[in-house]
Image (cartoon, helix red, strand yellow):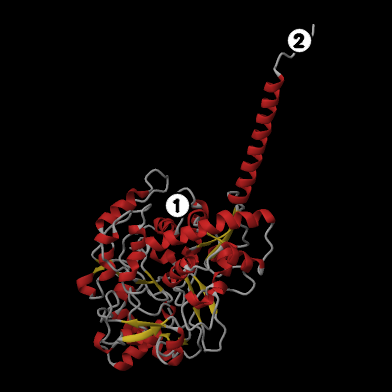
Amino acid sequence: MAHKDHTHPKSRRWLAWLALLLILGAAVAAIGWYKLFREEPQQFESVEEYYRYGSIGTEPEEGLPYWVWRVLPTLFPQHLPGDGEDDSYAALGVAWEEGQPSPVGFSLKTIGFPRIGINCAACHTATYRTAPDGERRIVPAGPHQTFDPQAYLRFLSDAAADPDFTADNLLAAIREETELSWLDRLLYRFLIIPRTRDGLLEQAERFTWTEDRPRWGPGRIDPFNPVKFHPDLLALNPAEDDTIGNSDIMPLWAMDEQEGYALHWDGLNDSLTEVVLSGAIGDGARPDSLPVEALGELEAYLRKLAPPSYPFNSLDQQAAARGEVLFEETCAGCHGPGGARTGTVIPQPEVGTDNHRLAMWTAEAAERYNAYAEDYPWDFDAFVKTDGYVAKPLTGIWLRAPYLHNGSVPTVEDLLRPAEERPEVFHRGYDVYHPDLLGFIHEGEDAERHGFRYDTNEPGNGNAGHEYGTELPAEDRDALVEYLKTL
């Protein structure tokens, strides 16, 4: 016997409308997820390509919409450094390979929409030219002499604060680069662009502490104060901490040679794995976005990567042979393979170099970093507070200028002179090499025009200390320079 449907017609209509609303809600949620949160994997042919352009997990938290980022220099050239001759990111010293959608060290990844993020190569990629009109050569894992991270951050915040940072202006500029769908245009207008502006202004607020301290300049960064003061990381108060951590960027090649050595300038950690992971976090990744397996492959790559050979054919072999003997006698104990003090922390009063970078890292910061990721299987345990600076091996030393931990001495030839004879003011960030002095051209019209004025009298910029070898006769110093070219 058939059963009658006693459901009231109004109830059936209500249920139908409810079902329709649920279907529409699910469709909107699916579209929202697809347009804003879906994650597309990156594809690379080699680990070196991944090093240059791969994600280290910064895009979800710190990534910018690629098309917004792409048009900012064109819209806001007045906020770029320099004399206005360059309205592109090249004004900030980035290394951009032809045919690539982003500079070396900038990762393009789709998370809902294309986003741009920073990776390790942004700071750890050297460039050099052998002549002003010569080809710019890019060296993975070397210290970036031309990129100015602080100027990059300031450009982004200044652009976001500009009254012309509007959806109309940005969408018009984006239209010149690519064609967005009607739905993407709506999302950019009402969600992505406003949120980008707010995020950049929030970032600017987090970095207000830098305004009362000396500029970093190209090739330098304050590596840990941004981590110390970030409210979601170590959460220390910048109002109670006036330390200056400005440091020259370090090379990351041949890390196998530093196995068991103290790492960073002050030896605050001796685990390369922790250094790689914490570096990604410092760049903007968070524990749940870290690509731990990929970063492990990156670590293996850095362990085996050799530095570039000295590119000039002017090496004096006889002088270099004599310089090798001098190196073994005067330098190898701290900087040679197997040296008794190589890779160890030399107390600051002994080495005599500027104290500010050392003072920046505190016992409290080390304790907080060790506790930061304790709920994750890769947590940190090796952060410590030290009392000095590490005696580094000199692998690839020819491409590591300027010298000392704060980049305060432009050439090796200057470093082998007493502190009072070293340049008091010079320009850094010009990547044309001076083969005779073992360093980059740092004075003259081109260096002044393309470089950053570095004053050793500013706090954190001192060039005193490390006067080892300064007592050698001039011919011995020259021989030592020749040998160092071969490392």
Q: Which residue is mark 2?
A: 3
Circle 2 — which element?
loop
- Answer few, some or many: residues within 10 Å of disc 1's Cα (few below 14, many 20 plus, some between 14 and 19): many
Q: Which mark is residue 130?
A: none
Image height check: is 34 above or below 428?
above
Q: Amino acid at mark 1?
A: Arg
Task: Identify the residue at horizontal 33%, vertical 51% (top origin).
Answer: 370
Q: Position of residue 200 (x, y in %)?
A: 46, 61
- Answer few, some or many: residues within 10 Å of disc 2's Cα (few below 14, many 20 plus, some between 14 and 19): few
Q: Position of residue 244 (x, y in %)?
A: 29, 69
Task: Identify the residue at horizontal 27%, vertical 84% (top origin).
Answer: 469
Q: Position of residue 301 (x, y in %)?
A: 51, 62
Which residue ends up furthest to the top in the rendered image? 1
Q: Amino acid at mark 2?
A: His
Q: Which mark is residue 286?
A: 1
Which residue ends up furthest to the right in the rendered image? 1
Alpha-carbon span between mark 1 and mark 2: 59 Å
Instruction: Determine if residue 308 is in view.
Output: no
Left or right: residue 201 compared with residue 477: right
Q: Nearer the viewer, mark 1 or mark 2?
A: 2
Task: Identify the residue at horizontal 49%, vertical 63% (top origin).
Answer: 119
59 or 301, which lies in front? 59
